Image (cartoon, rainbow, N blue to C red):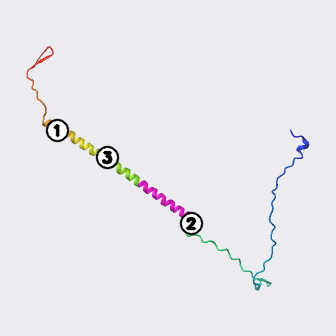
Amino acid sequence: MIPPERSAAVEVHHPQPVVTHPPAAPLVPVQPGTVPAVASVVLPDGRVVTGYAIEPAKPEPVAAKPPVSRAAVNVALGGVGFLAVCGGLLLLTTFITALTALITQLITLAAVIFGGWIAVQVFSASGHRGGTTVTIRKAVIKRNKFYG
């Protein structure tokens, strides 16, 4: 705990940086190259005000702006990139669709050829009997033996 005599005398010091500036050059008034003409103006209440005419300040020439802003160029480039991606996706989907159609046609062709081969086998077998023909007349079976 801080003793009471110390707590009342708390001081906070904020460090101040030491700044050394180079000595400033003395200001020298610059006279205009030519003496302007004296002008007098008569106010509406009849008073005359006389003074030097001051040329209005000419604005600094503005740097030439490009005819198209950067934002417009960025939006246009983004649109071109988007169109390129969409074109690529369209070509990809077209390729996948064509590949699917090709596979479907190959499966159909295989089914037709295989079905035709089966049909030829079935219909040709009924018209032509190949192999050995066995005619059984009277058969006598005794004790698991066949006598013909």
Q: Which residues are magenta?
A: 71-90
Q: Amino acid at mark 2?
A: Ser
Residue at image location 49% in from the left, 60% down from the top: 79
Q: Position of residue 86 (x, y in %)?
A: 45, 56
Residue in the foreground of this view, choosing between 23 and 100: 23
Indicate the quadrant containing the N terminus: top left, top right, bottom left or bottom right.
Answer: top right
Label 1 Cα crowd, 10 Å radius (few <14 / some 14-19 / many 20+): few
Q: Which mark, by number, is residue 69?
A: 2
Q: Position of 32 compared to 2: left or right? A: left
Mark 1 and mark 3: span between their CA atoms? Answer: 28 Å
Q: Residue at x 43, y 57 (%)?
A: 87
Quarter occupied by the C terminus: top left
Q: How many marks?
A: 3
Cα distance between the residues tagged 2 and 1: 81 Å
2 and 1 marks in contact (CB < 8 Å)? no
Q: Is residue 5 above or below residue 82?
A: above
Secondary element at image label 3: helix
Mark 3 to mark 2: distance in Å?
53 Å
In the rendered structure, which amino acid carries the disc numbered 1?
A: Phe
Identify the residue position indicated by label 3 in the image: 104
Determine the main secondary structure of the stretch shown in magenta.
Answer: helix
Q: Nearer the viewer, residue 27 or 105?
A: 27
Instruction: Work out which residue is located at the far right of the displayed protein and give it.
Output: 5
The residue tagged 1 is 123
Q: Which residue is depicted at the point 43% across and 55% down?
A: 88
Q: Tell me which numbered mark, 3 or 2, is placed earlier along the sequence.
A: 2
